[in-house]
Amino acid sequence: MFLRVFLVATAAGAGLLCAQTVPAPADRALVRQLNDSFADVFEKVAPSVVVIESQREGLQSLQGLPRGLEFFLRRPDGSMQRAEPNVGSGFIFRPDGYILTNFHVIDEAAEIAVRLRDGRKFPAEVIGVDDRTDLAVLKIAAEGLPAAELGNSEAVRVGQFAFAIGTPMELPYTFTVGVVSAKERSLSHVYGELIQTDASINPGNSGGPLSDIDGRVIGVNTLISGMNRGLGFAIPINLARNIAEQLVADGRVRRPWLGISIAGVSEDLRFQRLFPDLTSGVVVQGIEPGAPAQGSDLRPGDVILAVDGVKVDLAGDLQKQILSKQIGQTVQLEVWRQGKRVSLGVATGEMPDFQQASMRPRPNPVVPPSVPEAVPQPSSPGMKFQDASPESLKEFGLRRQEAGGVLVTEVEEGSVAAVAGLEPGDVITEAGGQPILRSQDLESVLTAGPGNGNGILLLVDRRGSRTFAILKP
């Protein structure tokens, strides 16, 4: 019945009804209820929505301009014109003047002004920003403001109604309707998981609220470049609330991290070939220098299967689990290592400000996609190496506290070693599960060759970062 009523209402709104589809009186009553429900959402949420004008620095000088052009760039009083303001959206989440919006709405702004639904306009102060989640908190000098009611994004269901309010194309308080078309969307260039909706989100909608049928905010709309044609995205409000609270309290965001680069087995064909016995799990591609994981038993080439008993299938699953922990908390990882399950503990640390993300896949993992038939076999991998002595390391500008290892000094172009991603200056510390202390150790492993078709797994110290490579026949 409800689907029929909704279709009738949609058709009526589009002017497509014919005599045979005129709803019965009872249906018309339901349609009116649905119509009123939509209007109620707007009336409840709109007072909390604000228009944000961020003014970037305009033209500062006439130097370099063609002669005569400066006349058109001056105001009547002789001063220089300023660049047009960037217009975006936001919403009040605390009645004492705190506003949530997107970071990109106010990025590089010299001045920020906020216009309320009632027409009042205030200068805004930036309390804090988090470029990783594209969120920012502003503050205006006003009290008793109509704050939005924040919902629970974990309770959001795919298929439920979704409503966006914002300033698309500089048209303030535009109201669009759609449904939640997906949850937990992971995009490679976006930190965290997003809510996907077909409610129209266009330039200017950024920072505005995405609400449910009860007028509760379930997400912060964000425009994904090149993906605004029928695809809208919103930062889940549970994540946004956490970020906003930290920004209000400290002006910055503190996150737990392990300091590892990762990729899901099922997300990369190369890892599916490398780990044929696994259909899911997250490969540790590398460990950053000085990261919390560096002091643990976790190794590059390990496949993480679970965190504190919670299964992780994709890279986003692992990231979500680690971000839910406390800084300094020890997590128990179930790891697949050389055909065996291993349990080990790793204590999280605080993500440094200079890090772009706690766990982002490396763009070029050192895993060979394939090896041409003509290249040498692992017994002659096409590289030169020697003991990693203090003298040999010094020639490459390297210093290591750990003793032992083999220093790669040359890599032949097109060889097995080159395809594996090895580079001069790499220090090999383990090969085929055997510790490598000197050149003879590596020569013995290479002479024996791979025990299976998966190649020889090498653990590598690359200027302080720990990673792995595969010498594959």
Image: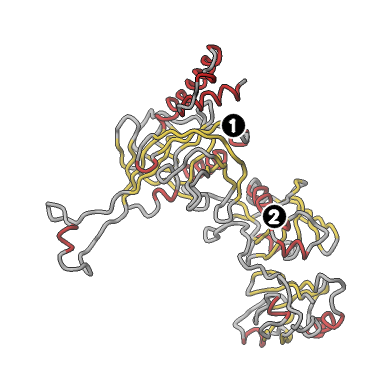
Residue at x 53% of width, y 39% of height = 198
Residue at x 45% of width, y 46% of height = 102
Name the residue nearer the viewer: 246 or 10. 10
Q: Secondary structure at mark 1?
A: loop
Q: Which residue is mark 1?
A: 160
Total marks in image:
2
Q: Quadrant of the N terminus?
A: top right
Q: Hey, which quadrant is residue 151 in on the image?
A: top right
- Real-space Cα distance between discs 1 and 2? 39 Å
Horizontal arrangement in the rendering, residue 55 relative to residue 347 (left or right): left
Residue at x 29% of width, y 50% of height = 84
- Going by the numbered disc 1, the residue's amino acid type is Gln
Instruction: Check the image and report above or below for 316 versus 420.
Output: above
Horizontal arrangement in the rendering, residue 114 relative to residue 420 (left or right): left
Name the residue nearer the viewer: 177 or 458. 177
Q: Residue furthest left?
A: 77
Q: Quadrant of the C terminus?
A: bottom right
Asked if labels 2 and 1 touch by Cβ distance under 8 angstroms, the answer is no
Name the residue nearer the viewer: 443 or 392. 443
At label 2, counting other C-alpha atoms closer than 10 Å, the crowd grade (few under 14, some 14-19, many 20 or more) is some
- Going by the numbered disc 2, the residue's amino acid type is Ala
In the image, residue 329 lies at what x, y percent?
68, 50
At label 1, counting other C-alpha atoms closer than 10 Å, the crowd grade (few under 14, some 14-19, many 20 or more) is few
Q: Residue furthest front?
A: 19
In the image, residue 436 lies at what x, y percent?
79, 78
In the image, residue 271 lies at what x, y percent?
74, 63
Please name which of the two marks, 1 or 2, marks the residue nearer to the observer. Answer: 1
Instruction: Check the image and report above or below for 60 versus 256.
Output: below
Q: Which mark is residue 347?
A: 2
In the image, residue 85 lies at what x, y percent?
31, 49
Q: Which mark is residue 215?
A: none
Instruction: Check the image and report above or below for 212 versus 412.
Output: above
